[in-house]
């Protein structure tokens, strides 16, 4: 008997020994990468400059559309360093100065910065101002010197600056104040001390300024009028010639300004190409002697021979991209040309003066899912036999970046993932016989060995080699990257839609791309000029009776930026990435309402509202229509018109009238509207509950055995409005002029359930709504600190149900139907706290059954994600909680929310450019999956109140086994001992 | 990291005013970020690189980086009360409120918002460094014994090995009397509630 009571605590001890070492949230440094992954991206490359340093690692400096400047390893494509500039600080140009500084011009040409090439440390920063807004151009001449200072020439804001490369000092500047002067090019002929500034004035006058590069003195100013005007861009043909188009786009002009004399040469395009039709545009490039124009789908390359004589060298109707010229040797310049032909791309490197000869001609098989080549950048290297080798960096339609060398793709970066529009999660296939992808667990001996190592690690007996072995063993665990569903629901697919119109499926285990698909419906076409992806919805989530079907997602996109443009729907298989179907709609898509009904194949019913306020039902099947008709009168939705400050509630009326008879189209009616006075309130944020959120219980037992009932309604809307004056930046308004008003509105009836005004507060407001509470973040101008407030809403009509006798006798109203049309008796509680940081996004953890306590996930301005217990935002917190309240877990009130460094879920990492946080429940109740995205991606698992329902990752089975063995040994020993004792007793 | 920090300490504080009226339509805020030596070097959380420290005005309106000497500046700032935040991995910086006054340009008015401490110069120092990881405590027997489970086990061992001894040493008559008493009281003992415990 003694043995039995001995064994139980020992087992408990073994269990507890593990859990006591695992704190609530935080990680040990050696656990990094076990459950989380982090991926760094840069976005679609706008400009690339190759570092010409002969020694050290080869680099390429890029600027991107995500406003990143980065230095990449040319050999592997990894990031050496990277900086994300502010959203108002758009990069205009980059270059390398003196071989060791990266020069960036940004903010419309008003900020010039220099960064140290090896490590990315900013060296200097110069602010350039000017009289008026203009195009900004950056030029870093290689050998222009003023008193031993290398010079950077910048044209911005109507002023030409010469800036020292060493310290950013402005050496001289020259204003171009002529009213209508529009600069087109700044040219510095190599080897001379002259700078040419050319541009247009009054759209029909060509202006040329010749400036002394040493002191900014104006040497010559010439202008010439061309009667039919100019069309935007010019292309630089040589240092003293530019090519332009007239305003109709049918006449080519070569303008030369040799020795300060301007002369025009006109050539109608029809003289060069017979079947040209429609206006042409110039493709900006800087290949000497050659320029390209594009009419319709035809690209024409034209060579300039001698004085203004033009010759067509090639016309092609393939998609083509040209690089800038690269000087390779004295007087020789090379450029790269990439053309599409079927599934291959043809890369040709030519010398600028010799079109017909190729330095290099390769064809490379290209993944069709990458689309067209958008940009080409060329770089050369000297081979061992002294000949020139070329490598080419190409930017594809899906925003990926590839390095081509010797006819092959050396590396590629999926930088489309830097601009995610929408994310949704999908289950993986169920494991069946023959489906299993991962290899079988290695043999028992290895397993035991692994666990012995782990045990050593826990007991701090491991040598450094052992530690390394443990670490690699944990990271390599094949378990987490299997392609099948697991018991705990940790393995899922994250399906992301990027701005390039590409869908990616990422595996939650290790973040790898399972499939990617460039949506055909998001391809540019005649009918749809500029398609934009909008949203993604889960179209089909089979789990009960349609298990053989693959889940699918619905991608909604639109042809053009206006909300009235026709929409496009595409249905994509979540397992394979195949586009199952796509519908080009005739109607616009203003709002998409996923309905809580599914048909027999588990396709979810969706209601699409168009710009004429008609509702269209999808899928268009009679079964869906039948389900829909049954619920016809129960469908309500709302719309927010932010500009007019109106929130409206809608319901369905009848079948569409007037138009072509379509039984899936319905007319709608307005039920209610809330109009905010435009002179005092402006809507800045609206938030509702997530439609798939699960609430475990409505009742909340509080300290004194009392019960409060949460007011849980899917139809609550949180609205925040500010004074119109206070909608700008912080610092632009005084506390007296600014206020923030928040509302809780019932979206079925339009009833305002709660309204509260924060005087002296200002946006931006970030809010999250869950269960019966909403938490919002705003700026308090009086204290000049950020604040977070919580509002909890409770149902009073059920408050008298706590009498047990009433329940027993059936005199309760728990079963009475709830109608939102009856006036709800609600009470609200709220409280506010200071919060240190600015916030970029707020989310809340969600679990499978909603039992686990919640945590707020706050994306801070430093691009970290902080997990904050909801208990800190509990309106029942007080300065001195009673004993009973303490037992309930109420934390004494403090004026600000604590920031505990260990509770950053991103630990020491940054999710650069953080935009959104998504939480997905795992099957295991204690755990939630968190995906944060911006320019970087970060994924982790969180257990807001520990993993109470499973053993932790580093549970040591070896210790358990060891304990059992020790116990069995102890049993035998004690048994023998007691036997002997018994024998002795008997002999006595 | 260390050489940079040393460099920071060596650089003398310039007498440059925090706020100066720049050319154009706004004012300029100049300041510097100073990371004292010693902070961040202890522990094993690697502090972020100096080159990755961002200085953010008004929650993202303007973002700038530090020069090698730690200085930063914001240009074209309108008069008003602004908020400057420093984002640096490994350090906790308090946001700073900076008043840019139109009436007397050049007047320094800055205060940490966390503790309302005024700053005579816009020199931002971290309030504390941030450890993002738990530190593994070395294994020790005392820790195990002191934990609630350890105490419980100790008690159990005591019961298992010492109690029989005590019972053994008892006078059989006395024991019988005690058992009688118990039966009379009829209080269910804890032991009898546990499965098998009653038989012991």
Image (cartoon, coloured by chain):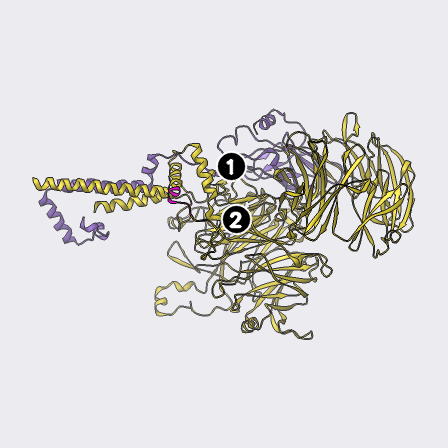
Which residues make up the magenta segment? A441-447
Q: Is residue A156 above or below residue A621?
A: above
Are the numbered discs 2 and 1 placed on the same chain, yes or no? Answer: no
Q: Position of residue B69 (x, y in %)?
A: 64, 29
Q: Is residue A839 above or below residue A195?
A: below
Side of A926 relative to A138 (left or right): left
Where does label 2 land, which residue? A857
Mark 2–mark 1 Cα distance, whole angstroms, equals 18 Å
Q: Residues within 10 Å of mark 2 (few under 14, many from 20)?
A: many
Kindly state the secondary structure of the residue where label 1 is placed.
Answer: loop
Q: Position of residue A130 (x, y in %)?
A: 79, 39
Query: Hue of chain B?
Result: purple
Q: Is residue A38 magenta?
A: no
- Chain ID, mark 1: B
Side of B133 relative to A42 (left or right): left
Depth order, front residue of B173/A772: B173
Q: Residues within 10 Å of mark 1 (few under 14, many from 20)?
A: many
* Quarter of the figure with the C terminus of chain A: top left
Depth order, front residue of A451/A916: A451
Q: Position of residue A696 (x, y in %)?
A: 44, 59
Depth order, front residue of A634/A17: A17
């Amino acid at each position: 008997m003694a043995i039995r009571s001995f064994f139980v605590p020992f087992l408990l001890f073994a269990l507890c020994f593990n859990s006591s070492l695992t704190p609530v949230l935080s990680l040990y440094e050696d656990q990094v990468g076990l459950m989380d992954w982090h991926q760094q991206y840069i976005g679609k490359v706008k400009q690339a400059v190759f570092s010409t340093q002969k020694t050290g690692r080869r680099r390429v400096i890029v600027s991107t559309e995500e406003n990143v400047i980065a230095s990449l390893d040319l050999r592997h494509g990894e990031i050496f360093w990277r900086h994300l500039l502010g959203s108002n600080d758009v990069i205009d140009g980059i270059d390398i100065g003196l071989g060791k500084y990266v020069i960036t011009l940004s903010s419309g040409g008003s900020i010039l910065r220099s960064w140290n090439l090896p490590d990315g440390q900013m060296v200097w920063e110069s602010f350039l101002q000017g009289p008026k807004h203009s195009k900004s151009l950056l030029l870093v001449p290689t050998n222009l010197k003023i008193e031993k200072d290398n010079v950077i020439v910048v044209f911005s804001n109507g002023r030409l600056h010469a800036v020292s490369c060493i310290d950013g000092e402005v050496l001289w500047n020259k204003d171009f104040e002529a009213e209508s002067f529009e600069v087109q090019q700044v040219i510095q002929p190599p080897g001379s001390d002259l700078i040419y500034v050319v541009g247009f004035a009054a759209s029909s006058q060509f202006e040329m300024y010749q400036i002394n590069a040493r002191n900014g003195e104006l040497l010559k100013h010439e202008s010439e009028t061309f009667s039919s005007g100019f069309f935007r861009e010019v292309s630089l043909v040589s240092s003293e010639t530019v090519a332009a188009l007239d305003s109709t786009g049918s006449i080519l002009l070569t303008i030369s300004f040799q020795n300060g004399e301007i002369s025009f040469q006109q050539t109608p395009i029809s003289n060069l190409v017979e079947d040209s039709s429609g206006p042409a545009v110039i493709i900006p490039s800087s290949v000497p002697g050659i320029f390209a124009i594009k009419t319709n789908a035809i690209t024409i390359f034209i060579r300039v021979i001698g004085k203004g004589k033009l010759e067509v060298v090639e016309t092609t109707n393939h998609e083509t991209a040209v690089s800038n010229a690269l000087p390779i040797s004295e007087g020789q310049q090379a450029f790269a040309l990439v053309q599409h032909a079927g599934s291959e791309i043809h890369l040709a490197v030519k010398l600028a003066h010799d079109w017909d000869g190729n330095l290099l001609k390769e064809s490379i098989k290209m993944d069709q899912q990458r689309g067209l080549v958008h940009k080409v950048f060329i770089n050369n290297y000297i081979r061992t036999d002294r000949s020139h080798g070329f490598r080419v960096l190409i930017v594809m339609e899906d925003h990926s970046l590839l390095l081509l060398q010797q006819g092959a793709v050396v590396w590629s970066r999926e930088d489309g993932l830097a601009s995610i529009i929408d994310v949704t999660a999908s289950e993986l296939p169920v494991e069946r016989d023959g489906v299993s992808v991962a290899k079988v667990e290695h043999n028992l001996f290895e397993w035991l060995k692994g666990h012995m190592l782990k045990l050593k690690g826990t007991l701090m007996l491991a040598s450094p080699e052992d530690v390394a072995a443990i670490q690699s063993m944990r990271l390599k665990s094949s378990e987490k990257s299997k392609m099948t569903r697991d018991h705990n629901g940790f393995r899922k697919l994250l399906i992301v839609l990027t701005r390039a119109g590409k869908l990616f499926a990422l595996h939650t285990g290790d973040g790898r791309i399972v499939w990617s698909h460039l949506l055909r419906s998001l391809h540019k076409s005649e009918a749809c000029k500029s398609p934009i992806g909008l949203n993604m919805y889960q179209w089909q989530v089979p789990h009960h009776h349609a298990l053989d079907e693959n889940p699918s997602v619905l991608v909604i996109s639109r042809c053009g930026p206006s909300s009235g443009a026709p929409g496009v729907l595409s249905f994509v298989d979540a397992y394979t990435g195949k586009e199952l179907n796509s519908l080009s709609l005739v109607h616009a898509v203003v709002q998409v309402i996923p309905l809580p009904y599914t048909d027999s194949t588990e396709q979810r019913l969706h209601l699409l509202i168009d710009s004429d306020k008609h509702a269209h039902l999808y899928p268009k099947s009679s079964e869906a229509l039948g389900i829909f008709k049954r619920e016809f009168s129960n469908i309500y939705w709302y719309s927010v018109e932010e500009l007019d400050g109106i929130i409206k509630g809608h319901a369905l009326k009848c079948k569409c009238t007037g138009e072509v008879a379509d039984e899936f189209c319905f007319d709608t009616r307005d039920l209610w509207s809330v109009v905010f006075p435009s002179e005092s309130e402006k809507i800045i944020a609206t938030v509702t509950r997530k439609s798939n959120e699960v609430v475990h219980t409505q009742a909340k037992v509080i300290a004194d055995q009392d019960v409060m009932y949460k007011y849980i309604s899917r139809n609550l809307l949180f609205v925040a409005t500010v004074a119109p004056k206070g909608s700008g930046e912080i610092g632009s308004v005084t506390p007296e002029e600014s206020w923030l008003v928040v509302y809780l509105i019932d979206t079925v009836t339009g009833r305002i359930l709660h309204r509260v005004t924060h005087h002296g507060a200002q946006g931006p407001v970030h809010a999250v709504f869950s269960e019966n509470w909403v938490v919002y973040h705003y700026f308090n101008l009086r204290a000049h600190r950020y604040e977070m407030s919580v509002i909890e809403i409770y149902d009073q009509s059920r408050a008298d149900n706590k009498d047990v006798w009433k329940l027993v006798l059936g005199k309760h109203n728990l079963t009475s139907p709830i109608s939102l049309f009856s006036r709800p008796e609600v009470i609200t509680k709220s409280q506010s706290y200071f919060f240190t940081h600015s916030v970029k996004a707020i989310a809340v953890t969600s679990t499978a059954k909603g039992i686990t306590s919640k945590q707020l996930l706050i994306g801070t301005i430093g691009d970290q994600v902080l997990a904050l217990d909801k208990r800190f935002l509990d309106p029942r917190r007080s300065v001195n909680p009673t004993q009973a309240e303490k037992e309930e877990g109420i934390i004494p009130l403090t004026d600000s929310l604590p920031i505990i460094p260990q509770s950053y879920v991103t630990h020491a990492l940054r999710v650069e450019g953080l935009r959104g946080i998504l939480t997905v429940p795992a099957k295991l109740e204690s755990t939630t999956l968190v995906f944060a995205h911006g320019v970087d991606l970060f994924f982790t698992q969180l257990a807001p109140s520990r993993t109470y329902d499973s053993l932790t990752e580093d549970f040591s089975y070896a210790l358990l086994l060891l304990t059992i063995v020790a116990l069995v040994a102890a049993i035998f020993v004690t048994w023998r001992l007691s036997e002997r004792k018994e024998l002795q007793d008997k002999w006595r | 990291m260390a050489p940079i920090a040393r460099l920071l300490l060596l650089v003398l504080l310039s007498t440059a005013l925090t706020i100066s009226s720049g050319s154009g339509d706004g004012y300029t805020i100049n300041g510097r970020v100073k990371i004292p030596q010693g902070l961040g070097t202890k522990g094993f959380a690697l502090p972020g690189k100096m080159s990755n420290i961002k200085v953010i005005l008004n929650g993202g309106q303007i973002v700038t980086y530090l020069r090698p000497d730690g200085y930063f500046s914001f240009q074209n700032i309108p008069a008003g009360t602004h908020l400057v935040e420093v984002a640096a991995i490994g350090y906790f910086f308090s946001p700073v409120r900076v008043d840019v006054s139109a009436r007397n340009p050049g007047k320094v008015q800055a205060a940490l918002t966390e503790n309302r401490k005024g700053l005579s110069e816009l020199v931002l120092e971290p309030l504390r460094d941030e450890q993002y990881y738990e530190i593994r405590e070395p294994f020790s027997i005392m820790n195990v014994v002191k934990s609630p489970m350890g105490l419980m086990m100790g008690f159990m061992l005591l019961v298992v090995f010492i109690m029989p001894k005590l019972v053994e040493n008892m006078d059989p008559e006395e024991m019988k009397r005690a058992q009688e008493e118990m039966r009379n009281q009829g209080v269910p003992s804890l032991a009898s509630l546990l499965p098998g415990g009653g038989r012991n």
